[in-house]
Amino acid sequence: MIGRLAVLAAGLAVFVLAQDAEFGWPRWEQRSLDCTSKAAGDSCLLVAPAAKVPRDPAKYKCRVEAMPQNAWNPLARNSKTRIACPIGCEPDADLSVITKKPANNTLCQKYYTYGKYRDTKENEWYLWITEPCRANLTTHCRFRDVPYGSASVA
Ligand SMILES: *[C@@H]1O[C@H](CO)[C@@H](O)[C@H](O)[C@H]1NC(C)=O
Ligand SMILES: *[C@@H]1O[C@H](CO)[C@@H](O)[C@H](O)[C@H]1NC(C)=O
């Protein structure tokens, strides 16, 4: 049984690697928004640790924009505006699941009080957050700037 599971796991790993090679987005970088510390004030600060191309937080300024109002979103009923911040990810690749800290803040609900969107004019991914949510948000984005091992170069 264990042997069979191992074979299955190995097969899955090869499959996942092959997929990655095919799509060619193998490198991940973390992107966080600090929206809770004193330094962030009433906005958010980009935190991009270990970014291959350094991301100067001063150049990734958040903007304040209208919060879309929807009947299905009572949580943000009193939110006229939201904070939206560019995060310096490649526009062609999707982002990983967004996590929030503190994780148990029930006022922070994806789609309702925080989320992501791609600004197609700017070709830039944004994370956004609105009242009453107050949290740090973290996601990861992919880059296709790693040459593949010689194995895939016939
Ligand atoms: C939010 O991010 C800032 C900056 O990285 C960090 O100092 C702070 O501890 C974080 N807060 C939480 C609740 O994770
Ligand atoms: C969330 O977790 C923190 C630390 O574990 C705790 O102090 C706080 O009371 C919790 N908040 C809620 C709303 O559960």
Image: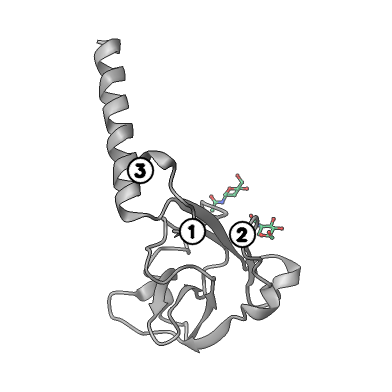
Task: Name the colour scheme.
Answer: one colour
Q: Is residue 86 left or right of residue 1?
A: right
Circle 2: residue type: Lys
Q: Quadrant of residue 33?
A: bottom right
Q: Earlier in the sequence, mark 3 or mark 2?
A: 2
Q: Residue 139, position in %: x, y?
A: 49, 58
Query: Label 2 crowding class (10 Å Cα cut-off): few <14, some 14-19, many 20+?
Result: few
Image marks 1 and 3: residues in contact by CB distance under 8 Å: no
Q: Residue 93, position in %: x, y?
A: 38, 64
Residue at the extreme front: 154
Instruction: State how far apart marks 1 and 2 are (Cα).
Output: 10 Å
- Residue 63 against residue 74 in the figure, above or below: below
The residue that disc 1 covers is: 145
Task: Return the residue nearer the eye: 141 or 53.
Answer: 53
Circle 1: residue type: Asp
Image marks 1 and 2: residues in contact by CB distance under 8 Å: yes
Instruction: State how far apart marks 1 and 3 are (Cα).
Output: 15 Å
Residue under the point 42% across and 69% down: 115
Q: Earlier in the sequence, mark 1 or mark 3?
A: 1
What element does badge 3 sit on? helix
Circle 3: residue type: Ser
Q: Which mark is residue 152?
A: 3
- Residue 18 against residue 113 in the figure, above or below: above
Marks 1, 3: nearer the viewer: 3
- Residue 141 against residue 88 in the figure, above or below: above
Residue under the point 54% across and 71% down: 88
Task: Return the residue nearer the eye: 79 or 5.
Answer: 5
The residue that disc 2 covers is: 52
Query: Label 3 crowding class (10 Å Cα cut-off): few <14, some 14-19, many 20+?
Result: few
Task: Return the residue nearer the eye: 71 or 47.
Answer: 47
Instruction: State how far apart marks 3 and 2 are (Cα).
Output: 24 Å
Q: Within 8 Å of ligand 1, the CB of disc 1? A: no
